[in-house]
Image (cartoon, coloured by chain):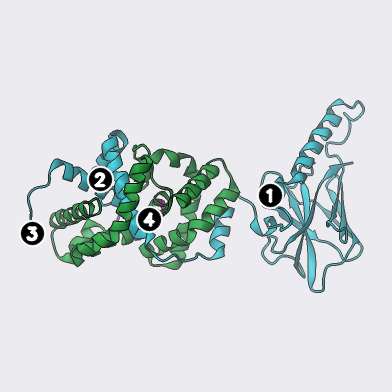
Amino acid sequence: MNDARRSELETLIARIALGDREAFDALYDATSAKLHAVCLQVLKDRPEAEETLQEVYIRVWQSAARYASNGLSPMTWLITIARNRAIDRLRARGSRPATAPEDAAAMIACTAPGPESATIMAEERRMLDECLSRLADAQAGAVRAVYLEGVTYADLAAREGMPINTVRSWLRRSLLRLKDCVSQ
Amino acid sequence: MTQDAPLTPEQIDQALAAELALGLLDGDDARAAQARAADDPVFACAVRDWQERLAGMAEALTPVMAPARARQGIRERLGHSQPPLASDPTARTPWWRGPFGALAGLLAVAATAAVLWLPGLQDAPATPDFQARIMSQDQSMAVMARLDGRDMEVALENGTPAQGRDWEIWWVAADGSAPVSIGLVPRDGVLRMTLPEGLEPSADIRIALSDEPQGGSPTGQATGPVMAMAPLTAL
């Protein structure tokens, strides 16, 4: 995401925080297809993805005023809301109690980065694909499945036929390797 | 899957931040990590950085357009405008915020002032009488609406709906609630009706006309273009 687009989305979110419906429409136009793709990827069910998408934008309308304080780039903020909502719904499907990452995004107390670290972050984004491809297939697959499909440690343990603690340790190391690679 | 050297404290923090960002923690672990993110800026920034990093996977997804009804659903659930009626192509600003809005506001003030200050009007009936003349810009269409108490009359003064079309009359409140259909403009003669419950005549009500399929909007919301709109003015 280039700086112009980022600042355009930030402006829209700031206007939405003031109750500007035109800005809300413009943000929807600019971002809904991407967020819908996120919901579909997690839920793999069109009606549920569509319903979740609506919840996401209602959330955006209601919490736009708190956006500036969380330090996330606008697209990450939107994606995080969409992903977490979709995973909420996914986990509510099963009998498992919903222990989704419910708005951890909104709670973090990290002040906004300067332009320099935003640039570094953008560079890390560009490296992500490359670095995922450098992980072993199973590791990369697990990281993707956890992020894009809401897979849990218990799911991974069942899938890999390993104890949960082993799977956890393995995934943690995969994540650390990924971070080392993208921050090089 | 071999066990390497134990993780350093920094690595453990990083891994925990990643797990929080990913929603991999349960119960007490999740609550403890969330509490830490709220208190510890270094940890909070590590979580934020993971969210940024991981979002790259979502950004790489191919966009999928959502059906139009999703947007409509959002608007309805937020109590926003009713979009088909809002899409007056002649107005840059949403039509309910246009000059009609300001005019209606002024009229409301004037009406209130008149009721408060003019002696002799103190005993006037609680519901004043109103009218609205709804005209297209080129005046090829003109419709007159009159209110006497809660009795309403609507008459076509000029123009005719196209073959197979009807002009639908909408009651538009200033609070942004959904416009309410109050009937179709009669092709000849006068439409007489009593206002439904919940519709209170006042100077900040506007009457709008939209072009609809014969028999009126199939959805209960305007589907065709808004042809004209006018505020109720007190008589």
Label 4, label 2: how far apart the Cα atoms are? 17 Å
Label 2 or label 1, whichever lies nearer to me, is 1
Magenta stretch: dominant secondary structure: helix
Label 4, label 1: how far apart the Cα atoms are? 34 Å
- Please identify the quarter of the rendering in which residue B3 is found: bottom left
Magenta residue span: A81-96
Residue at x-position 26% and y-position 62%:
A130
Q: Where does the image place residue A141, in percent across and percent down from the top left?
A: 24, 65
Q: Where does the image place residue B137, in percent across and percent down from the top left?
A: 83, 56
Which labelled disc corresponds to residue B8? none
Q: Quadrant of the C terminus of chain B?
A: top right
Q: Where does the image place residue A180, in percent across and percent down from the top left?
A: 20, 51
Q: Amino acid at mark 1?
A: Thr
The residue to which callout 4 is attached is A83
Q: Amino acid at mark 3?
A: Thr
Q: Amino acid at mark 2?
A: Ala
Which labelled disc corresponds to residue B17? 2
Label 2, label 3: how far apart the Cα atoms are? 23 Å
Secondary structure category for the residue under label 2: helix
Label 4 or label 1, whichever lies nearer to me, is 1
Secondary structure category for the residue under label 1: loop
Q: Chain ID for label 3?
A: B
Q: Where does the image place residue B179, in percent across and percent down from the top left?
A: 70, 53
Mark before the other along the chain sequence, 1 or 3: 3
Residue at x-position 77% and y-position 70%:
B214
Mark before the other along the chain sequence, 2 or 3: 3
Label 4 or label 3, whichever lies nearer to me, is 3
The residue to which callout 3 is attached is B2
Discs 2 and 3 carry the same chain letter: yes
Q: In the rendered view, does A26 fall on the left or right side of B216?
A: left
Which labelled disc corresponds to residue B93? 1
